[in-house]
Structure formats: structure tokens, C-alpha cells
Amino acid sequence: MEYKVSLGPQHPALHEAVSLRMTLDGEVIRDADLKLGYSHRGIEKLAEERSYIQNIYLTERICGICSHSHTTCFTQGVEQLMELVPARRGLFIRTLIAELERVHSHLLWLGVAGQEAGFESFFMYTWRDREVVLDILEWISGNRVHYAMNIFGGVRRDIDELQRKKILDSLDLLKKRTDYYLNLAASEPTFVGRLAGVGKLSREDAIALCAVGPTLRASGIASDVRKDDPYAVYGEIPFEVATADSCDVLGRAVVRVKELISSYAMIEFLLKNLPEGPFKVKAPRKVKPNEVYSRYEAPRGENVHYIKSNGSDKPERLKVRAPTLANYPATIAMLKKGFIADIPLIFAAIDPCICCAERLVQLDDARRGDSRVLSFSQLRSMANERAKKIDFKKRKIAWPF
Amino acid sequence: MNPEAMLEKINAEAGDKVQEAAISAPRRIQLKAQPRQLKPLLAYLKETFGLAHLGTISGVDLGENFEVIYHLSNADSTVNVRILTPRRDPKIPSVCPLIPGAVLYERELQDMFGLVVEDIPDPRRLLLCDDWPEGQYPLRKDWKFERPAEIIPGGK
């Protein structure tokens, strides 16, 4: 007996409102369909009527978590169109902010994953430590979320010696905490057992459905724009692309923890090798007719901006593709054959944004013809109930570190 | 394989499918093709160079024509394949049989530019709302947003 469940558009794991319609057979999802567009703001059209400098601030507001990702992607694209070589110190600071942003985004995600798996103290721990990163970002830029650091030719603010020392000190704390999480997760079999085997995405599917970021890398493909198409100063920083072969939510968690550790190393490298000199250079206002395809590795995956200029101070066309859109087809593949109780976990595994509190789920029971409404907290308790039933000793799953 | 060698190979093996080929920037190859040659060309690129990752599909309104650009990437380089389609009959073939992940981008093109993607597996609207009027395509250059007059209930 099949019946349909619609979920959303208010969704706690995504900061965009998205509606999900599923065909269920008992507890198993047979088919899923996404409906988007609830938060479509027409930014691409608006960008055609704004100057390049105004567009930096516009692209910053595409996302509230990876705000720096969008401006960097846009700025480096326009710099190529202007044939402008940005200041080297500026590029280092830009990369530093990018890695700090990745740390705060991944810490946020780890907390969300813990919460969706029913490990709520983990959520509180990681979000407390995320404050450390947000404080660093505030020291540097003056803001916690919209840093507004990028300008054409470099960055808006410099870093002084005191800030550098302070960041390195805070980094020690973060490293200690991340090590603690690793041990905690490894010694907590229920957490590992809850994540393993959920939301399977095979290597072939991940390639065919054009997945990006940790979702792609957790399916065993070492694809990272920082390595494949190095921008800013990533060509000079030594780092390894983190991958996992388990193709499930556990793999996505492992990839993100590995990336956290490599981000700490990168931040240290950037601060220790920060070159002297100016942090910005003067940029022209008008841009010659040309086009550019700019790629950037945001915390959630490959972010893409296509910019076409027409000789004026406004772009002819700006096309933005954020990583979450690229991961939607893969999410549908992951949901199929999964359980209702795994939806929060699977959804949270592609996107670490959480901004809403409550969601409504309409359950239509085809056998009785009546419908009932579940709140998200009820859905989560269903998920926890399911987790309790798993016999972890039998499954023998170990944390892969 | 570096982009220069790739370009040479494309010119030698798929010269009949490509109208123009050039390297525009480091790791960026630009190709231009006829719409009917698009699918054979993408199949060749996927088979030969493993260009299976479609970054996105960009549409640009050029006035007489629409330009549609397919951004494909592998570990070494990005290939931008562009086709032109006339404004009076804007038809493009669907690439979903080759790249299943392209469906959302093709639906977006249908919404925003009014392109007709032939044989698209899922022709529904993606981003525009359900009560959006027919024949209005926001990203076309001749489309201007006019804010509807504000009517205050009970006001004068």
C-alpha cells in the first residue's frame, strides 16, 4: 500500500524553504520529489542593474553561512575580467577568511548531525566551540556573518600582529576540542551506528547526478576545486583532499572532520607565511566585454559564478549556482529506499544550515483516508526510537579513524 | 591531460562537431557547436576526457539569439560548450540521457528564458511560483519588473 507524504516548505535543516513530496510504502520511501522556489529572490536579474561594486554586497547576501564563498567567487571572476592582479597579502587574508568560514560551517554541521542523530550534547559542545571561530571572524572583519571582506584587488581590512597571535592561540583550543570530538565519536557506538549505512549514494550515482563537495567526496571521489582548479593561494598551500569510501552519512561526517583538521593546518600555514606589503590595489570601475567562469570550493561544495561583461560598469549577466542546488538530485537518490525517520539525517548531511525551529509534516494514511500532522519534534522522537532499536553490538561498526 | 593537449585532441578527433575551439584562460577551454551536434559532442567529451561533471548551464539573452553554455569539468580543466538558438524558435536538446544531473538546470532555463528543452524528463516549473503568468520569462532582457500598484484594503 503506497501513500504520499509532503514535507515542508518550512524545513529545519535547510535555510531555504523547500517542499518534499514522498511516495511511501509503509516506512520506506519509494519515490521523492522536490519543489523549489519558495525563497527565489531574483538576485540574477537584480545584479544586471547594479554596478560591480554594489554586486559584491548583493552576492554576499545570497547565503548566510557561506557569505564569503559567494563574494570571493564573484570577486575573483571580476578581477579576471578586469585583468587585475590582486595584492598578495590580500589574497592570503581572503584565503584565511575562507578557511575560517569552512571551520565554522563544518562545526555547525557536526552539531546538526549530532542533533539529528539524537546526540544533543554533541550539538551543544560543537556550537559552543563555533563561537570561538565566530569571535575570530569578528576580530578580523567586524562582523560575525556578513564579513564584507572582499573588494576588487584585495581585501577591505588588514590583520595586525596582535590579531595574528590571538588567532593562533584560539586555534590551539579548537584543535584540542576537535581531537576530543574524534575520541568521543569513536567511543560512542550509538552515534556511529546511527550514521552508518544511512543515505547511500554510490560512486556512479554521485558522478552521474553531478553531486559536489563533501557529498561527492564521501562517495570516494577526490574532487576538490581547491586542488583541481586552484584559486587565491591554494596552489601554494600543502593539503590533502579528504575522502571516504562508505558512501553514507557517516562518510560525510568523516570527510568534514578531516577537512576541519586540514583547515586548521591551512590557517596556521597562512598566518605563519603572511607576506608583507599592501593588502589591496586600486581597481578600475569599468570592465571590458568578456566572460568568465569562476569556481570556488565552498564548505558545501563547488560554487559557480558565470559573469559576462559588456564594457559598462554593470555586468551583462551573472549566473550563480550554489552547491545545494547541485546536491538536490543526489539527495533524491539518497532518500529512495530510505526510512522516514532518516529524512532529517539525510537532508542535514548535504547542507549544514539550520535556521527554523518547527516543521509540519502531513501524513496521509491511504488505508484509512485520514491525515494527521506531526511536528518536527515528534518526527525526531520517531528517529530516536528507531535508533534505540538498532543492535549496535551485532553490527560491529567502528569509527573509521 | 593538460588543456593544450586536450584542445589538440578535440580538434583532431571531433573537428566536425565543433565550430570554434580556443583556450580563453588557464584551465578553461571554449567550444562552440551547432545545437544538433551538442549531444554527440558531450558524449564524446564524457567518453574521452571523463568530462561528466556539469557545473551548471548558463543562458544568456543576446537579442536575436539565446546563448546556452554547458560548463563541464574534470580534474584538470573546465570546458565551456556553447550553442546558439534563435529567439523565434528557442529549442535546445535535453542532455539528461547523458548527464542525469542536468535536469534542474534545464528546468531553470525553461522557467527563466522560455527555452523549449526537447525530451526533458521533467518539464514542470522549477523556481517560478504556480500562479506566475504564462509567457513571462524574467531573465530575458526585454522583461522588466513592474511593481503592481499597492491596494490598501479599506483605504482610499
Image (tube, coloured by chain):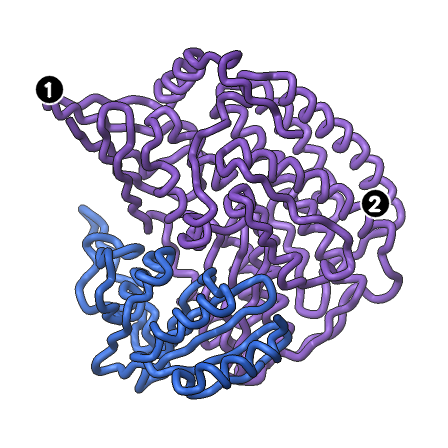
Chain A colour in the picture: purple
Query: Comparing marks 2 and 1, which lies closer to the viewer?
Result: 1
Q: Which residue is mark 1?
A: A368
Q: Secondary structure at mark 1?
A: loop
- Say yes or no: labels 2 and 1 on the same chain: yes
Quadrant location, the N terminus of chain A: top left
In screen coordinates, is A61 left or right of A95? Answer: left
Residue A75 appears in which quarter of the rendering? bottom right
Proximity of marks 2 and 1: CB atoms separated by less than 8 Å: no
Q: On screen, A389 above or below A271?
A: above
Q: Residue at x 38, y 72 (%)?
A: B59
Q: Which residue is mark 2?
A: A163
Q: Residue at x 68, y 29 (%)?
A: A129
Q: Is residue B83 visible?
A: yes
Q: Nearer the viewer, residue A401 or B135?
A: A401
Whole-percent x and y of residue A351? 49, 41
In screen coordinates, is A20 left or right of A135? Answer: left
Residue B140 appears in which quarter of the rendering? bottom left
Mark 2 crowd level (few <14, some 14–19, many ≥20, 10 Å Cα): some
Q: Amino acid at mark 1?
A: Arg
Mark 1 crowd level (few <14, some 14–19, many ≥20, 10 Å Cα): few
Q: Secondary structure at mark 2?
A: helix
Q: Amino acid at mark 2?
A: Gln
Q: Residue at x 64, y 35 (%)?
A: A257
Q: Is residue A81 visible?
A: no
Q: Nearer the viewer, residue A160 or A322?
A: A322
Chain B colour in the picture: blue
Whole-percent x and y of residue A87? 77, 68
Question: Which circle's residue, 2 or 1, is located before the other in the chain?
Answer: 2
Compute the Cα span from label 2 to label 1: 64 Å
Whole-percent x and y of residue A291? 52, 78
